[in-house]
């Protein structure tokens, strides 16, 4: 819903001169992603399409790796809201990247339970192995490193999120093995969630 | 006690619909649908079930407050945002007992007259969401979710809604805002969600573990449930143990169990790792006051922990041994609160950052004695002065550590460094730097 619930505020109808500047490559959802998005929108009342805005952003990020302003415009069009509303949401949540990130996005939990178990040293070792600071991406585009807040797996500390996967009980001394493993074997080297193992 | 919420979490395929049905799954729903919604609410009220998300508010009351006369649709929002540091119990329930979550949602919907429940799951739990979606599809195909459930004319849908990284989304009105596709920032209350919640409609926001307690109450009755624990603290409870404990993990126990048993008993935490002495315990997620080692002989119940001056909160028990610098621990937590403040209320948005700055200064050995008083002053100007409980949560780690470990703060200022033995400071880069 936008300024007026009965108005369609898609790109064509938005008369405000506060337009969002182009940024990044041209973006259009793939037909598959558009279909997925319509299916997700159907979970909410018809006049509440905006509820699907996070899902729309996830799909854009899945398609392009990060969320550009051009992608935000496509989200606004699909959700039928203003680009300002999309920007508002993108800038609040931590899981949307507004810059390109590496193929493997390492997210080391730094909150207390993981920190008590040496998470700071895990980050330090990963920095040494990768040669980048938290928030940066390696020149070859393979790895990004972030420190993140409590991931909710405090019994398997320290935990490292790698894209949408988990890697539990990471020791500082194994940082090199983790990076090499990801380079050669990809996500297969990750422990995954210990609860999840039996399910797959 | 027999496990009620987590009996099959280690059983292979214990999470599947087939397994759940073999254990008598969804029979509580059948029983509840044969009752009137009012009777279900009364039953939950009589059980004394208290919300497991942190506040401990009676669930039956929450459901009763939902405005049933409103012509608008009603909603259940299952709070699966689980972001309180030290808390990981809902994760186990959703991953290993998802149908109990669904059954609780469906009974809740029947009780308040809702036709849709949204499970708001934190974005980082992607692998959990995959399990939930797959099991939801099976339940839907089996006619347990959807139109005319059990031929009673009861229609109900459950949808999973993925968040995108925001601690604040665990606050009930911020969760609703996020579900509506906005920033996860809290609303001014009243109106409470029971009157005007999701899309302005009457809404009940319940924690995952809370809803999981509902089917057993329907099956075994409110007296059975209440008798499982101390007075006003009935039913099973999940405890999350982390930090310097030998066996970290999620443990189910009645609330008779004491904090000391949870930390030291071989069935639970098994004691402190590495032969070290215990120093401090955060009993209910990072937002609550610390308990000292001589305060642990209390029931780990809502009222038991409150009597010791803290809160059971989300039952995320973080155990810290003698090697832990409390200034460092407070600094670590205030970084969290600074980072996660939604920015709506000035005291929390600005104060959190100032607290973190001050703590960093003291920890680096650059602090002055007056900084310690300043910490308390800033924290007390956040406490009780924000829309949601987040402000109190941010102030608490500072106030509790200054109160209980003031000499450690003073030593940092006096010596210009952390005064713990050097070999204990290996976990932290800041401590190791000196």
Image: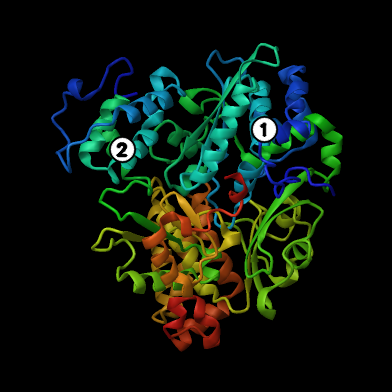
Q: Distance between the residues labelled 1 and 2?
A: 33 Å
**Where's residue A77, x and y in %?**
26, 26
**Where's residue A162, x and y in %?**
43, 55
> Residue B113 versus residue B24: which sits nearer the camera?
B24
Q: Can residue A178 be seen in this view?
A: yes
Q: In which quarter of the image is the C terminus of chain B?
A: bottom left
Q: B32 above or below A101? A: above
> Residue B432 versus residue B150: which sits nearer the camera?
B150
Give SS at disc 2: helix
Q: How crowded is mark 2: few (under 14 residues within 10 Å), some or many (20 or more)?
A: many
**Where's residue B159, x and y in %?**
53, 29
> Residue B417 versus residue B141: which sits nearer the camera?
B141
- What residue is disc 1 on? B17
Q: Which numbered mark, 1 or 2, is in the foreground of this view?
A: 1
Residue B204: image quadrant is top right
The label on residue B42 is none
Q: A1 above or below A19? A: above
- What residue is disc 2 on? A60
B6 sits to left or right of A26: right
- Same subunit under labels 1 and 2? no
- Name the residue located 56 percent from the left edge and 34 percent from the top edge: B134
- Name the residue located 58 percent from the left edge and 19 percent from the top edge: B115
**Where's residue B212, x and y in %?**
69, 37
Residue A56: image quadrant is top left
User: Which subunit holds the residue at mark 2?
Assistant: A
B235 sits to left or right of B199: right
Give SS at disc 1: helix
User: Which subunit holds the residue at mark 1?
Assistant: B
């Amino acid at each position: 819903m936008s300024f007026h619930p009965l108005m369609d505020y898609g790109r064509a109808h938005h008369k405000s001169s506060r337009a969002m500047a182009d940024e990044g490559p041209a973006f259009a959802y793939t037909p598959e992603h558009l279909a997925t998005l319509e299916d997700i929108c159907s979970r909410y009342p018809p006049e509440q399409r905006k509820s699907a805005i996070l899902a729309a952003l996830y799909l854009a990020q899945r398609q392009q790796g990060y969320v550009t302003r051009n992608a935000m415009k496509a989200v606004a069009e699909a959700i039928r809201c203003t680009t300002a509303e999309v920007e508002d949401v993108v800038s609040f949540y931590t899981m949307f990247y507004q810059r390109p990130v590496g193929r493997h996005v390492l997210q080391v939990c730094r909150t207390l339970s993981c920190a008590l178990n040496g998470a700071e040293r895990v980050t330090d070792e990963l920095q040494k192995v990768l040669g980048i600071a938290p928030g940066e991406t390696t020149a070859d585009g393979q790895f990004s490193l972030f420190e993140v807040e409590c991931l909710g797996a405090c019994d398997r500390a320290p935990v490292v999120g790698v894209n949408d996967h988990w890697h539990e009980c990471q020791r500082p001394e194994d940082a090199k093995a983790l990076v090499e493993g990801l380079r050669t074997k990809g996500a297969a080297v990750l422990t995954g969630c210990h609860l999840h193992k039996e399910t797959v | 006690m027999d496990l009620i919420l987590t009996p099959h979490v280690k059983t292979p395929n214990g999470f599947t619909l087939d397994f759940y049905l073999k254990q008598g799954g969804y029979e509580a729903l059948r029983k509840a649908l044969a009752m009137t919604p009012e009777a279900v609410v009364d039953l939950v009220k009589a059980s004394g079930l208290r919300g497991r998300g942190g506040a401990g508010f009676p669930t039956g009351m929450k459901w009763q407050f939902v405005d049933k006369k409103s012509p608008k649709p009603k909603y259940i929002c299952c709070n699966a945002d689980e972001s309180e540091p030290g808390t990981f119990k809902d994760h186990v329930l959703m991953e290993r007992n998802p149908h109990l979550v669904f059954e609780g949602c469906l009974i809740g919907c029947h009780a308040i007259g809702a036709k849709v429940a949204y499970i708001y799951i934190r974005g980082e739990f992607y692998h959990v969401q995959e399990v939930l979606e797959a099991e939801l599809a099976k339940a839907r195909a089996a006619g347990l979710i959807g139109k005319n459930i059990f031929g009673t004319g009861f229609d109900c849908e459950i949808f999973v809604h993925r968040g995108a990284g925001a601690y604040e989304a665990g606050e009930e009105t911020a969760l609703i805002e996020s579900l509506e596709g906005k920033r996860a920032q809290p609303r001014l209350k009243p109106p409470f969600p029971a009157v005007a919640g999701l899309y302005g409609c009457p809404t009940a926001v319940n924690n995952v573990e809370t809803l999981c307690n509902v089917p057993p109450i329907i099956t075994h009755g409110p007296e059975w449930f209440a008798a499982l624990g101390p007075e006003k603290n009935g039913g099973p409870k999940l405890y999350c143990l982390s930090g310097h404990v030998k066996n970290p993990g999620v443990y189910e126990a009645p609330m008779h169990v004491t904090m000391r048993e949870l930390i030291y008993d071989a069935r639970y935490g098994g004691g402190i790792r590495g032969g070290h002495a215990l120093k401090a315990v955060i009993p209910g997620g990072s937002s609550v006051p610390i308990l000292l080692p001589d305060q642990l002989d209390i029931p780990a119940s809502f009222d038991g922990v409150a009597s010791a001056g803290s809160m059971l909160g989300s039952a995320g028990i973080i155990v810290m041994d003698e090697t832990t610098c409390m200034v460092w621990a407070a600094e670590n937590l205030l970084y969290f609160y600074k980072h996660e403040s939604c920015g709506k209320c000035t005291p929390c948005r600005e104060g959190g950052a100032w607290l973190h700055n001050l703590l960093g200064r003291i920890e680096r050995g650059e602090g002055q004695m007056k900084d310690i008083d300043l910490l308390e002053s800033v924290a007390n100007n956040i406490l009780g002065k924000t829309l949601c409980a987040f402000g109190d949560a941010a102030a608490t780690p500072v106030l509790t550590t200054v109160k209980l470990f003031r000499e450690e703060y003073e030593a940092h200022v006096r010596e210009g460094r952390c005064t713990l033995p050097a070999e204990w400071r290996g976990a932290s880069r800041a401590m190791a730097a000196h």
